[in-house]
Image: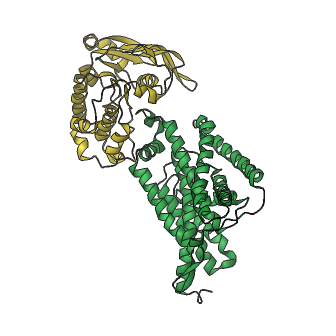
Amino acid sequence: MTANITWAAFSQQILVGLSKTTILFIVSSGLSLVLGVLRIPNVFHGSLYMIGAFIAYSAAMVLGGSPLGFWVALVVAPLGVALISLIVERGLFCRLYEREHLMLLLFTFAFMLVFGDLVKLVWGSDYRSLSAPPILQGYFSIFGLPFPRYNAFLLLIGPLVAFGLWFLTNKTKIGKISRAAAVDREMVGAVGINVSWVFAAVFIIGCFLAGLGGALVAPTQNITQGMDHAIIIEAFLIVIIGGLGNIWGALLGALIFGLTDSIGILVWPQFAIVFPYIAVVVVLMFRPQGLLKSVW
Amino acid sequence: MLQVENIHTFYGLSHILFDVSLTVSEREIVCLLGRNGAGKSTTLRSVMGMTAPRRGNIAYKGSNITGIKPYRAVRLGIGYVPDDRRVFADLSVDENLEISERVPKGGVRHWDRKRVYDFFPALQYIMSRKAGLLSGGEQQMLTIARALMTNPEFLLLDEPTEGLAPMVVRMLETQISGLRDTGLTVLLAEQNQKVALGLSDRGYIIDNGAIRYHGPIDELKANEEIRKKYLLV
């Protein structure tokens, strides 16, 4: 089975896996951020990812499929999702932070259903697709095998987002406050910080990442109902194996998930889908608390 | 400066404070003495609005602050040092101070990071260390330093010497009396009589959630009977 896999094919598949990792990392780091700081297991994070993809599609359509469309969509979709999350947070969530986790879980679950239906109402139940701009279409050759340009673009975006998140959490005041609030929100209030606004900001940043993930994934697959369910399961698993609330854990989890998925496709295509889940099981057998330190 | 009038505070169904009243005047250090579980921390938490009283009134500088949000209390000039050394463990010493820095409305910027490091030189050497890795005494210094960064006029100090080595306690004592000289008003909750009696101008004794005694510190020092009754374990 493995004898006919060449080094080049293997390397290429690793790169494909890494570009899938980028999307998974962007989405699950947002989920993890919200989970860590606000203590909300946000089930509708996946819905925001789907909405991000649909908004990206619509934004590109408005511009009549011009090459600029994709780039505008890439900006408009995450911002649109951030705006939705701002409304939901200020309108509803900010009143519920003191409730128990189960209530919050049910509440976000309800919102996943609501958002799912809203997407159906607004965009209908047809498949949509968004094409990458010409500069990112086509292939170039790596190790003598074709590698999609768009995947290479994703490989550039991934580290940028990781750097942005590192900068945000370690170098900005709001990042430092959110790290403090993740551990002891009452004490953050007791040094004069209005925690409510910090939570709003973190929630919006987390949801922005879901929208960004949705916009980035749009050219690589059909934009469709059900995208939300698929991603939210993967994102939660990634956050759990990485360590709840730990952004670098999300990176590690996304790497494990993305790479086992793409290697699975290479070695045993019919059963590729189970490889990441086996990896999750193996990780949890040895590190039930997650690979990196959980803030919970 | 602070008037607490007949407050009743609960944790869920349990009634913790019964009709507690106390006053602190400007530039005074007042201690609230009591055993473990007597209601000292709950009194301070009530003032901060962290556990709002169900009945009664709390006024600060003449305005009603009963049930205020803690961050608003800080912005009025009330600093809070918690009893269990709740430093932001994931942040460095310097970051702990950085996020706490603020000047209350109408207040003066007396403390910044430089002055705080001058006041607690020990913290300067460990400024980049994670707060969670500090010793008990260092963490206690950091919680006080962090409260000072909010530039308070009135400081709630909850058992600053609890569980610290005698030498560290003596050092903190010197520093707390140094704070008085900067014009700070302090409400100090303590179990350690020696520290509290040495620092304060007046004292209250709290037991089982009710104030049992209050008077000038010299009277309290002389009244061994009452101290035995309420403070000895």
Residue A248's x, y, as percent? 47, 59
- Name the residue nearer the viewer: B149 or A279: B149
In this view, B175 is above or below B200: below
Q: Residue at x 33, y 17 (%)?
A: B228
Residue A129, image quadrant: bottom right
Does A272 sit left or right of A8 as displayed? right
Considering only vertical position in the picture, is B223 above or below A199?
Answer: above
- Residue A159, placed above or below residue A208: below
Asked if residue A209 shows in the view, the reply is yes
Q: Nearer the viewer, residue A158 or B169?
A: A158
From the top left corner, tell me how far across and down residue B182 is, in percent. Answer: 24, 24
Q: Is residue B76 left or right of residue A70?
A: left
Q: Quadrant of the N terminus of chain A?
A: bottom right
Residue B39's image quarter? top left
Colour used to depict chain A in the structure image: green
Chain B: drawing colour: yellow
Identity of the residue drawn at 47% across and 38% down = A185
Q: Position of residue A103 (x, y in %)?
A: 65, 40
